[in-house]
Structure formats: C-alpha cells, structure tokens
Image: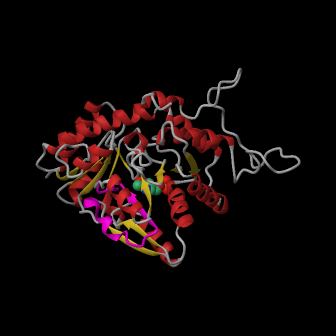
Amino acid sequence: MSTTGDGTRAVRAGLPEPEQYEPTLPGPVFAAHFHLSGEPVGPYTYGRETNPTWTHLERAIGELEAPGEQVETTVFASGMAAISAVLLSQARTGDTVVLPDDGYQALPLVREQLEAYGVEVRTAPTGGDAQLELLDGAKLLWIETPSNPGLDVCDVRRLVEAAHAAGVLVAVDNTLATPLGQRPLELGADFSVASDTKGMTGHGDILLGHVSCLDPRLSAGVRRWRKVVGAIPGPMEAWLAHRSLATLQLRIDRQCTTALALAEALAERTDVTGLRYPGLPDDPSYPTAVRQMRRFGSVVSFVLADRATAERFLAGLRLVEEATSFGGVRSTAERRARWGGDAVPEGFVRFSVGAEDPEDLLADVMRALDASGR
Ligand SMILES: *Cc1c(COP(=O)(O)O)cnc(C)c1O
C-alpha cells in the first residue's frame, strides 16, 4: 500500500479480502458477545474487548497513519477517551507530564485529573517549541500541532529528538491535521492521537477517537486501558467512520484549498486582524508547517473589531452555521471567547471551512463581513 496515493489509500483503507457475495465493506456487527465454546480464545469473545467492525476501522486508520508499516490502532468512543487512554495508561504517581498551555480546551481538566493522581504537570506554549525547556525528568511530552484554536505549530521532529534523547515518550494530538495533513509516527512520535469527531469523519454526526502506535508494547497499554475503562465506540459509529474515510482525501483537499483561498481573501481586508492559517506563506507557523505537513487543515482563525462585530458577522452568514467543532463538510464558525478558557480576544473567530463551492463560500463571508461593520 505504501506506493499508492492518498486518494487510492483512503478508498481502499481497511477493506477485507473480497469474498463472493459479501459486501465490499461489511456492515456493522452488533454483538455484546460472540459464540464461544471451549477455551475462551480467538479474536472475538466479548464486545467490550473486540469487535470485527472496529478491526476493519483500526486497520484503515493504521494504513493512513503509517502506510506500509506494522502499526497498531485502537479506536475509542471519543477524542477525549483516546487522549485519556494515552495519558492515564502511561503516567504513574510521581511521573511528570508536559502539556501545551494553548491546546484543546479540555486539557486543563486532564491536568486536574493527572494532578489528583499525583502526576506533576508542566505546561508551555506550542509556538517556538517552548515545551523543549520542560523535558528534564519527564515521562511523556504531549504536543498539539497545529494548536487549537491558535493555530501555532511546533517542530515535531525537533521535539521528538530532544524528548527521546532524554528518555521521554512523545504523543501528538493530530486532530486538526488528520493523517493526510501530517503523519506524527513518521515524524518520530510514539503515539499519534486524534479526535475523529472532526475532519477524519467530517460529517459532524459522530464522536470517535483513536490512538496509533508502532511499538506493540505501548499499544497494548492503550488497548488494556480501553478494556478497563470501557470507553468503546458503538459498532454503528465505527462503521460510519469507516464509510466516511473513503472520501477523506476528496473532502480534505477541497477544504484545504478553500481554506487557503479564504485566508488569502481575509488577508486583503483592513477590518480583519490576527489572521492565522498555517498554509499562508507569511504566517508565523508556515516555515515549520511546510517541513512537516502535507496539507494545512480546514481551520482559519481571525479577529474582528469586537464582540458585537463578530456576533453580527456570524449572524449574517448564510452558508455557514454557527457551531463549535470543526473539520466537517458544512462550514461552521464561532466566536471562541463565548466559551471562556482560551486566551483569545472577544472578536476572535474560529472558522472551519467545509466542502461548499469556494466562490459561494467566499462571497458569503465577504458579504457578511461588509454587513458586520458599522
Ligand atoms: C475536539 C478535540 C478533542 C476532543 O475530541 P472529542 O471527540 O470531542 O472527545 C481533542 N483534541 C482536539 C485538538 C480537538 O479538536
């Protein structure tokens, strides 16, 4: 599979060998338990441990995360279930974990939980590879690049090299990029983790997460955690996710191309400041992003004059729904400060570019911007 292109890989990922009179992608297997006589061995025993629908999806994601490699993937009920599985299966009382201080909004909750278990947590921003300074004596480094929602990028190879030299494991939250945008395991990370609720499944209708590892021992720890905690995806969600992967390259390519066009158009406007898109050549993230990313993602962020202007802009959009999350085929946008927690200005807008015709979307955004000014 390693010589095929992303589109070919996406449409074929994880498909079983063809069997006469069977569908190409077998349907979801709904089973709490499986026929199991005699010694309880074999691939499918009990539904919290294994399910054939997960197996197909896990193979598919593995083929995208590390084409041609022996990779092990574990799917979870959500991105947070996947993140917790890595951190809580690895960190022991007395260990130190390094987190970003500008990452996903639930990381402060994760920090509280880790600290409650006696794990020391250090934090630094994503930009400027600031986490490098905190590695001494740590057990695990957690990276989120591009960061959400600030879209800063850190140098994964550089951080991995320093971390591994210091005996520190590295996990990358790859949600924003998807494996078509960047492959953390190829960049040297020990864990590639994502919320597949976003661009990976892309329709805004399921929650899902995964962890991929090349090292079978690390993977076994993650898998054991899933069995213990029971953070398992339903077979229907797993099947829908696998079905959605077939269009991953089509969706992501369209979304990334339009995101760049939108960023270029916003760069021309005087009423837009703080514009960020890692694929924009004069963005601070660009020099590092081009060295490790193959596509720059569907999220563009920018700042409007104030809260009222941002609210008028969002209300004036016709093709863009006001909603949180990102990566879906329907464009969404939100004023991020409404949640609190992220260090962003009141007029900060996180815009997720969908699969609409670029000219329609850009016209809608420009019209809503014109109408939002006083
Ligand atoms: C959404 C998100 C998560 C959490 O994923 P869920 O599927 O909502 O649990 C984690 N990391 C990042 C970067 C995200 O955007």
At 46% across and 42% down in the image, what residue appears? 200
Q: Position of residue 203 (x, y in %)?
A: 47, 40
State yes or no: residue 63 in magenta: no
State yes or no: residue 138 in magenta: yes
Asked whether, in this view, residue 18 is left or right of residue 296, the answer is: right
Most extreme residue toward the top is 20
Q: Nearer the viewer, residue 55 or 262?
A: 55
Residue 230 is drawn in which quadrant?
bottom right
Q: Nearer the viewer, residue 130 or 261?
A: 130
Most extreme residue toward the left is 270
Find the magenta span and give its range. Answer: 127-151
Residue 202 is drawn in which quadrant?
top left
Which scheme is used to colour this image of the protein? secondary structure
Residue 99 is drawn in which quadrant?
bottom left
Whether residue 106 appears in this view of the structure is no
Q: Position of residue 291 (x, y in %)?
A: 28, 44
Whether residue 35 appears in this view of the structure is yes
Most extreme residue toward the right is 38
Asked whether, in this view, residue 140 is left or right of residue 348, the answer is: right
Asked whether, in this view, residue 352 is left or right of residue 206, the answer is: left
* Label tally: 0
Q: Nearer the viewer, residue 41 or 24?
A: 41
Q: Position of residue 146 (x, y in %)?
A: 33, 52
Q: Position of residue 257 (x, y in %)?
A: 29, 35
| Ligand 1 visible in quadrant | bottom left
Q: Nearer the viewer, residue 301 or 316?
A: 301
